[in-house]
Structures are given as structure tokens and as C-alpha cells.
Image (spheres, helix red, strand yellow):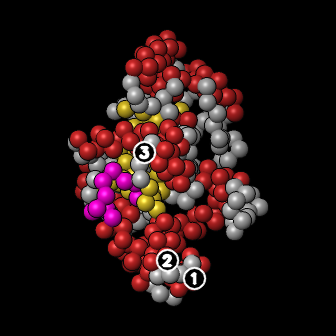
Amino acid sequence: MNITMTGNLGSGKTSVCKELKEMGYEIISAGGLFRQLAEERGMTVVEFNKLAETDKSIDKLIDDRSTRLGRELSDAVFDSRLAWHFVEESFKVFLMTDVMESAKRVYNDTERSAESYASVTEAAEALTKRTNLEKERFKALYDVDYYNKNNYDLIIESTKATPRQIAEEIVRYYEEFKKDKFKTKVVMNTGVIVPAVALDELNKEKLQALSDEYAAELAKNDTLTLCSDKTILKQINGYTVIDDGIEEYVAATKAGFIFMEVAGINDVCLDRAEAGNGARVLDSPAELDAYEAYMGIKYTFKPSEYPAKQGYTIDLSVAAGVSDAAAAAL
């Protein structure tokens, strides 16, 4: 079995693969396969790239090479947009990042000379456009829905985690998967989730007790991920909001957990009116400042600065990809 790695634009796949390589994994990248095919034909990468613009069979050569290597290798990491589709018997990983965070990375990346934007917002709009075009292209060429969460075994967020932390969690889940296969686990960063109520509305004694419990658990375990079946999430105005299991979330974040495994997003709403009565995003700077001080984190984007933003490109809703009848039963 191998690992196939993909993700949304600007999610940090290359950086995570560098960490996996340092951990002893062989990395098979689409770029590497492209260079290999060019060498086999006695061509430079520039010459081969020019040929690929008109000869669409080269894409198939790369796809076929990925399939073949997937059969020949074991415990390798395939870093390619569609490796999950072509490599048989793989642990399919999707690296997920908030669109605004991806845009910020692209905007600040001075090495991307071909990509220059006037603002983070402009970069986000450009990434969204590219995402939509890419989704249409993959559907037309391969009849796959690239951003359907059910294509993947592990969806892990990279918005507020280091490449090393992500790589270690991928390996841990991979080893678990090899022993007992599972389907579509969603692992989000704790530092992006916004509580639905103010900190002073929570039970401080319960918070401290839970935080001590989680700190002890963190010290004896080899994982940075908290698994909680109480976590209920919504997405409102592009923000991921927790309205059940808030105490567990806050205490775990304070204790040092970087990730939280969740069932998915129960509701994806464009605005609070659509979310219904009681839906709330903390937009008071003072309320979020209180959480930051208590949990020891910093929110990259706040509703007071960005009242509405894009969330994730991949649909994390619990009902995503299931039939209407099954969705109604959720």
C-alpha cells in the first residue's frame, strides 16, 4: 500500500512531502515523473512541456506511470493532483486549507513570480477561479468530482499546523488504516474553530478540569489529535463554528491539541439568517481576544475584520455525497 497526497491550491503539499521524505518515505511527484519521461525521450523539460501542450497523450503517460509505480512500490508517497484516482490500493489524503489562508500564502510567496496580486482578497478570488476551472477539467477528462470528501480516507487541515505536525499525523493515521481500513476521517485544526458563545458563559471549573485531563492525555500519547463525538460544527460566513462540545474544544486547545477529528460540518450556511435562530459567529473583538488569551492561540482571520469570507473548497457537510434519503436521516 502507498500514500497518495493531494489538496487544494496553496495547502502546503510540497512542504509536507519534504517532511515525509525526511521521515524515510520515497516521494513520487508529478513533476518528477514528467522530468523522467522527458529524459527517456532525450528531451529537456522545456521541450517536453512544449510538446505536452499539443500532445494530450503525455498526460496519459504520466497517469499510466503512476499506476504502474503504485503496483511496484510500497509505503511510497505519491504527490499528484489525481494520484488517488490512478494509484491502486492507496491511503488517500487530502490536505485542506482555508481559502483565505491559501491566498495569504500565495500573496506572500515571493518565489511565485508568475503569480502577483494586489491583495489577499484578490489572490483568494484568483484561487477560487482556478479551483472551479480545475474541478470542471477533472470532471470532463476523468469523470471525477475532485472536491468530494468521500474520495478520500483522510482529510487533514493545514491552515494552522506545521508541515511536520501534519506529516506525523498522516503517518499515524496511515499505520492505523493499514491495520483496520476506515473511510473519510476529517481532522481540523483547533486554532480555526470559533466558539458560538462568549468565554464568560462557560463553566470555568469544568474547563480547567478538562484542560488538566487533556494535558495529561497529550503527555502520554503520540498524537496531537483529539477525537470527540460531541463536536458539532457549522460553517457560517466561511467561519467554522462549534456550538456543541464547546468546553471540550476550548480545553483541548488550551492543553495543546493541534487537531480535532470531527464527523464533518452539519450545516454550511452563507449567512446567519440562513443558519436559523440561535446561529452565531462571535464578531466582537473583545470576545475573541478573551478566547485567544485563554487558549493561547491567535486567529488569523476574525469576523470583525472579514465579516464574510470563503471557507474550504472541499465540501465537508455530513450529507455530502450521500443520497437525499440518507441525508434526510442524518
Residue 72 within the magenta-colored segment of the rendering = yes
> Outermost residue, left direction?
180
Q: Secondary structure at mark 2?
A: helix
For marks 1 and 2, give the CA distance: 8 Å
Instruction: Tell me which corner region of the image, top left, top right, bottom left or bottom right, holds residue 290.
Output: top right
Q: Residue at x 43, y 16 (%)?
A: 216
Kindly identify which residue carries mark 3: 24
Residue that numbered label 1 is attached to: 47
Identity of the amino acid at label 1?
A: Glu
Report if the CB atoms under discs 3 and 1 are less than 8 Å apart.
no
Graded by Cα atoms within 10 Å as few (under 14), some (14 to 19) or many (20 or more), the crowding at tag 2 reads some
Q: Residue at x 42, y 39 (%)?
A: 169
Which residue position holds label 2?
Answer: 38
Please state the extent of the stretch shown in magenta in the rendering: 69-78
Quick check: marks 1 and 2 in contact, CB under 8 Å?
Answer: yes
Eyeballing the image, is 114 above or below 248?
Answer: below
Look at the numbered disc 3 and give the secondary structure of its residue.
Answer: loop
Asked if one can make out residue 276 in the rendered structure from this viewpoint, the answer is no
Label 3 or label 1, whichever comes before in sequence order: 3
Percent coordinates x, y for residue 38 in the rendering: 49, 77
Are the residues tagged 2 and 3 within 8 Å (C-beta)?
Answer: no
Lower position in the chain sequence, tag 2 or tag 3: 3
On residue 106, the disc is none
**In front here: 189 or 288?**
189
Secondary structure found at label 1 = helix
Dot 1 or dot 2, earlier in sequence: 2
Cα–Cα gap, marks 3 and 1:
33 Å
Q: What amino acid is at disc 2?
A: Ala
